[in-house]
Image: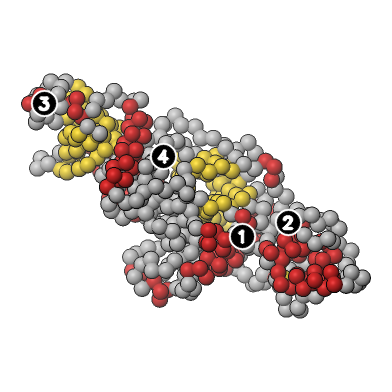
Amino acid sequence: MPMETPARIVSELTSRGYNADPEAVTLLAGADEPGLALAAAVERAPDDALKLSADHVRRVLDDAGANANADIASPEPPAPNTSASTGAKNSANRETERRSADETKGVESADRDASRPEQFVRDPDLDARSLDIAGDVTGESTGTGEYEDFVSVFRDRYKRLSSQLRSRVNVRPTSAVRKMPGGGDTAIVGMISDIRSTASGHWLIELEDTSGTYPCLVMKDREFADVVDELLFDEVIAVEGTLSDDNDDGDGILFVDSLYFPDVPRTYEPSTADRHVQAALISDVHVGSQEFMADAWSRFADWLHTEEAERVEYLLLAGDMVEGVGVYPDQDEELDIVDIYDQYEQFSEHLKEVPGDLDIVMIPGNHDAVRLAEPQPGFDDELRSIMSAHDAEITGNPSTVTVEGVDVLMYHGVSLDEVIAELPEEKASYEEPHKAMYQLLKKRHVAPQFGGKTRLAPEERDYLVMDQVPDVFHTGHVHKLGWGKYHNVLAVNSGCWQAQTAFQKSVNIDPDAGFAPILDLDTLDMTVRKFS
């Protein structure tokens, strides 16, 4: 019986109604006769066991080694297959009355029993896969919190974002603008240091560059005046206009005729994969919370084992794997698991339920056990060792994950709170989180405003700048489902796997829970499936 891969070990166990610890699978795969060892392990398993432990397999292998002439019965095996799950259970061992996924508005149903053959075997094209990560701060953090560090990160932000604007606007430094004669036309690129309205209802914007600051006035009757509502402190913009007549006296002002964001070019064309392959985009699992939806997660994991999901070869998880400890007031009263390490242990167990042949990428969020200040490095070695199921790729928040040529910018999304709080509801709201994401794409920065809800870790380089336009922008955090396209960039906020907590109810958050957006990487079309 050929058993050279752990994937085939898992497949055989599944066909016989068993699951196994990853270490148990490794031990069986490494045995001299994997087929005989597996048969012996199953035969000697306790009657009520559904999962084989590493200790049980060791005892079986030790007994076989001690008595080489022992008769290890092995029934005629079925033909090997290539399922690669280390967490699947035979469908007969799942709850027989588990409610199938419901169909919802604009969302396809994921009815497992109607589409899954009794013994479906995933057969992914592993050789066709490619996955690269860029922009990861993990292991690269240099900030010490000193004043100079903050100067460095803002200078870097200005340099990189202003370079995106200088190709479209012929700008001058503010120090040169102050010396120009009044009445002339000029342009400035700067970081917004102040925004205020005048007594007449106009808008005065202070722009700062590396040589100083300059006041710019947007008249309330200009056709673009409503754009001022979208501006945030510390973002970089460009303006064109006419200098006041008294400019050369040192009291000048620029009357703005045009205002520019770094933005995504309207002609942008995203990249796509060369074959029909899919990625599941999820976030905010929140294991450890009393409201973690374990049944919905298991329905999702079951569906991933079906023929309908055979093209799903990537799982991208945008933060908040666990509920954490001490994140908000009285959180301990809503915890099912009170120890942070136990939360990650349980999350890893749930991760084992999904097919082991998936390529998994995870970034941290604000509930995870990493620093709160962004950019967030990936998890430390201890937590990585806990979350070792399926060899998941762990990277920082944010990071750009290139999946078969498609650039997916993964960002947990704490700054969305700030954008939604600062901007008018029609431009950014929790009910339509993708519109807040459009604003971040327009500003080409995932967290433009400093000093509010979003903590910033000063680094030599601003890891939060979008140097390159992503093909897909994937966030979480706000626990709301929303997606749409902005200048051909697909923006997806993927909801959560946590029902409404008492705290969320107190702040009027009604989560969209148990959803899994499924992205076609070859077309960038998306289907959202509901498992709650």
Q: Residue at x 76, y 79 (%)?
A: 47
Q: Quadrant of the N terminus?
A: bottom right
**Above/below status of 390 relative to 292:** above
Q: CA separation, marks 3 and 1?
A: 65 Å
Q: Helix or strand or loop: what does disc 4 sit on?
A: loop
**Pointer 2: what residue?**
7
In the image, 407: left or right of 500? right
**Pointer 3: what residue?**
247
**Above/below status of 333 relative to 282:** below
Q: Helix or strand or loop: what does disc 3 sit on?
A: helix
First in sequence, mark 2 or 4: give its number. 2
The three-letter amino acid code for the residue at tag 4 is: Met
Please tell me which residue lies in front, 313 or 370.
Answer: 370
Q: CA separation, marks 3 and 2?
A: 74 Å
First in sequence, mark 3 or 4: give its number. 3
**Percent from the top left, x then y, of residue 458?**
34, 47
**Percent from the top left, x then y, of residue 524?**
54, 41
**Pointer 4: what residue?**
466
First in sequence, mark 4 or 1: give its number. 1
**Above/below status of 81 relative to 293:** above
Mark seen at residue 63: none
In the image, 285: left or right of 43? left
